[in-house]
Amino acid sequence: MRAGILTLGACVAAVTLAMTTTTLSLAVERIGSPAGADVVDSTSALRCRVCEELVGVVRRVADGPGALYIVEKLAIPVCRRAMSKKTVDPGSAACLAPQSSDQCKELCNGMVKSFAPALWHIAVRTKLPSRGLCAHMHMCSPDATLRRPRYEQLVAAAAAAPHLRVQKQSDAQERKSAAVSSSASGAAALRLQRPWLPAIPAHVSQVTDAHVDPLYAPGSRTDCGMPLCCQSRWGTPGEREAETAAPRYGAIECDIPAETLVSTARAMSDALSAAEQSLPRRHGGDGDVDGQAGARPVRLAVYTGDSPPHDIWRQSIASNAAVTKAVATILHESLAGGQLGAAAKAGSVGAVALFPVIGNHEGWPVNLFPGAGDVGPVQEKEGVPSAAQVFQATADAWAEFMHGDSLATSSLRAVGYYTSLAAPGLRVMALHTTAFSSDNPYLSVDSAGAWKQLRWADDVLQYAAESDESVLVIGHAAPPHWRSDLADAFNEMVLRYAGKEHPEGHSILAGFMFGHTHHDEWHVLLSDRSTRGSNSGDSVVGDDGDDDARAVYWVAPAVTPFQSASNPSFRIYDLRLTTESGSLLLDDYVQHRADLRAHAGSRLEWKAVYRWTEAYNQTSAAPRSVARASRGIMKGDGGPGPNLYDTFLANRHGGWPGSAEPPAQIGGELFVDSIAPPRVAHHRHC
């Protein structure tokens, strides 16, 4: 994960973490042989103690005149020395080319100036105890006396959050309540929301992680020695290096040009049209919709975040917002057939609904999303962006495509998450998942905002249950990539609404869509009745464990090919009322992909590479069916038909060669026990 490596390099270069990690590594190396538990324990204790002492020293000098200026001046040469000595991950290839001097200078200058103010503020100017800060940096063990907040503690943990209280009242009372409560979670305001589409569509398309690079230049170098290449400023390869020239649509060392996203969006529009034509007559099988000749069916699409490219050392809020706006325009125009007028108007036949979420790259610096009160005027003057600046820029980029849903737009602008009525009976709940991520340093300072968002999600689901609505939950990163206590609470919330809260007993959750890892994968949420291994303590699903499957967190592959995680991809889900559970459900999907190595150069050739039920020998993609397929993957076989383990590995990497992980390890990543999140290997891409 090059962005992650660069972020870590920035942390090191920003002195707070540089002093800690460098000094600690020297101290630990001199302790002696790590053999024996006593030595390991003493090493951990010493590392923690040194970290606490260093944090205390840094905090004592932090308020001195020009402290941040001095930090930046000292951090840049530290960063350049670290890069040149390959103390970062050797696979990152950061400033290792022959022309590395200028590159290291640009990389380190940009990273330090971008990240140092915020990281300095987080590490020094917060009330987080030294021990807590060191635990967040993995230098100390978490305090064992602190209990994780569980679902039943959400009320107390987020008592300040606005509540939903659904009450029967007259229209006049409802209008009065809506005027008084304009918050994102006010029940009266939700009742006044109007559906974007006139009917629930039969298909939902998902595209994620575009990472469009406005500076992408075909013919430029793909081996520039920087974390992100394929830009004209790195020059062109010589005659003997022609194979290193950037292709027209993208390369694994690079993000994509806008042209590749245009091709993706048009292919997705064509795939939706083909799916529409295969529907029964009532849904427009012959071009009609409910008897209206020539009218196009409604379209529902989801974009699960990350528009800006990976050159995180040279970005700003303005540049990220510009890329996000370009991505929004391309997607919406393609879905609407190039028409943003009457044909795409909300509530009309042929309408287009495109729901976005904020990814960890929409903000600046990457991953750093402060809470509402984490950044004040003093910090803003020092170059630390506030949450309001990030959310405002993102909301402005999507505002004209929000179909006049002022509640959703204002919520996105204020807190980064929102809910909207997609169609009668179908609600979308868009989460701001970076607020839950352990990669977000601000979460170590104050997690109150994250708990308020979970309380808000609970309120929305309660409203949907009482209003007989199904809910489609979308976000950037799936719960296994969140901080464990927040993931635990969310998983327990999902279990509550996966059947129990609905008046007729079936789930109100239509499905979950995420991105972020750039891989094609999923996570099955199990109930508390799942069996557990007696020796290792890991989650185990026996032959009769499929009934414990309650939900599936679908993770779609990316559009960008960056780091060979995936070829450009998009997905078309089937949204059906299943007879198995009596619930509206994402019941199957078709994965579409364009092979960058195979196209002739004139245009990308898109193919439907597999249908989930056919690829994994199942009749549907309901949770119990996905659990059954996951068990086959864990066993390294699939019974009759193709080997499910091999099928999963081939699909997971989007057509690129990938590492062959042991089946048991993959199983630990595919299943989510409500008692504890899975052992997910940290993502390497975003």
Image: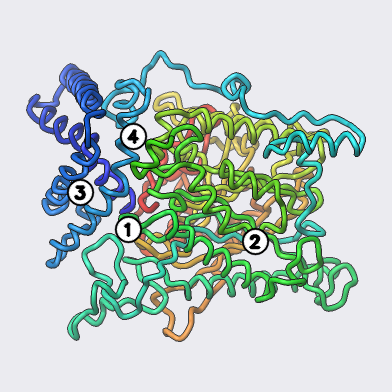
Q: Residues within 10 Å of mark 3 (few under 14, many from 20)?
A: some
- Residue at the disc numbered 4: 121
Q: Which mark is residue 590?
A: none
Q: Secondary structure at mark 2?
A: helix
> Which one is closest to the eye, mark 1 or mark 3?
1
Q: Position of residue 145 (x, y in %)?
A: 41, 13
- Residue at the disc numbered 2: 400
Asked whether disc 1 touches disc 4, contact meaning CB atoms under 8 Å apart, the reply is no
Q: How many marks?
A: 4
Q: Tag 4 or tag 2, which sits nearer the N-term?
A: 4
Q: Secondary structure at mark 3?
A: loop
Q: Is residue 590 left or right of residue 362?
A: right
Asked whether disc 2 touches disc 4, contact meaning CB atoms under 8 Å apart, the reply is no
In this view of the protein, can residue 627 be seen by the observer? no
Residue type indicated by callout 3:
Val
- Residue at the disc numbered 1: 314
Q: Which mark is residue 88?
A: 3
Q: From the viewer's perspective, is residue 157 above or below residue 543?
A: above
Q: CA distance from mark 2 to mark 3?
A: 42 Å
> Which one is closest to the eye, mark 3 or mark 4?
4
Q: CA distance from mark 2 to mark 4?
A: 35 Å
**At 52% from the left edge and 56% from the top edge, which residue is drawn?**
556
Q: CA distance from mark 1 to mark 3?
A: 19 Å
Residue type indicated by callout 1:
Arg
Q: Position of residue 140 (x, y in %)?
A: 28, 24
Asked whether disc 2 touches disc 3, contact meaning CB atoms under 8 Å apart, the reply is no
> Which one is closest to the eye, mark 2 or mark 3?
2
